[in-house]
Amino acid sequence: MANFRTHFGVALGGGALAAYAGWQASLWSFNEGWPLAVLTAFGGILPDIDSDHSHAIRLIFTLLAVLAVIAGALWLQSRLAPGPLVLACGGLYLGVRYLAGAIFKRFTVHRGIWHSLLASLLCGMGTAAMSFHLLAQPAPMAWAQGLALSGGALVHLLLDELYSVDLVGSRLKRSFGTAFKLFDYREPGNAVLWLLLGIALAPWLPPWPTLLALVNRGVASWL
């Protein structure tokens, strides 16, 4: 399978190219474009969050821990004195980075639900919803950010499938078909839970016509 550097590098390159193309097509400004490249690169390593010893899971949970500390500090700074605030932020970091990470490892398996089209889609939807409501991004940009994350995840899945083809020996490796799949066929119950999550998330998404308009503008710019 492709390694961390390959996943990250290819997704970052593809994201930078897409961000540049969208900028040239006046879909977004330059300053709005570079975060899309970063999100695509993040999506490029996201499916390996279920690999217990990968660079991806360490990096992702470190980033989540830092974000938890920032959010916690902003929320608690008016409620706690400096000393307790530092302790609370330290606890948040350790809790997310190590405790949440350990729990996540316990209940996930490599190339399970996270290596699927369903997970890629729902992660993009979640990104769009958070961008729209928490970061107050305009609907077109919120959708663009969700598409960027999902696009990076799809790049990851495609690379894993390409690396499972042995061109020298003209054969398919045992890992072929385990990455680019609709859902984890071994655990259909997980797919049902993810679908329910998607239904619950739907009311929080930016307006759908905005997504269609963004896609139509993107397609028109290539014609």
Image (tube, rainbow, N blue to C red):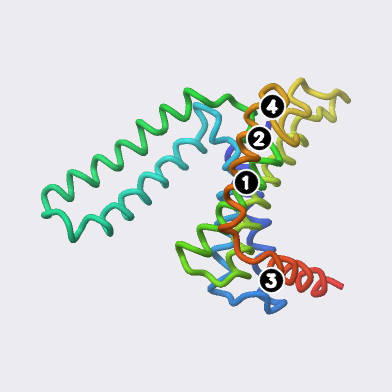
In the rendered image, which residue does mark 2 sit on?
115
Residue at disc 2, secondary structure? loop
Residue that label 1 marks: 198
Nearer to us: label 3 or label 2: 2
Name the residue rendered at 69%, 29% in the picture: 184
Q: CA distance from mark 3 to mark 2?
A: 28 Å
Task: Give the residue type that dot 3 points to.
Answer: Gly
- The residue that mark 3 highlights is 22
* Left or right for 98, reference 178: left
Sort mark 1 into few (<14), some (14-19) or many (20+) by Cα contacts within 10 Å: some
Q: Amino acid at mark 2?
A: His
Q: Which mark's residue is nearer the viewer, 3 or 4? A: 4
Mark 2 / mark 4, whichever is N-terminal = 2
**Which residue bears the numbered disc 4?**
188
Say which residue appears at 61% left-offset and 49% top-offset.
9
Look at label 1 and name its amino acid: Gly
- Nearer-N-terminus badge (3/4): 3
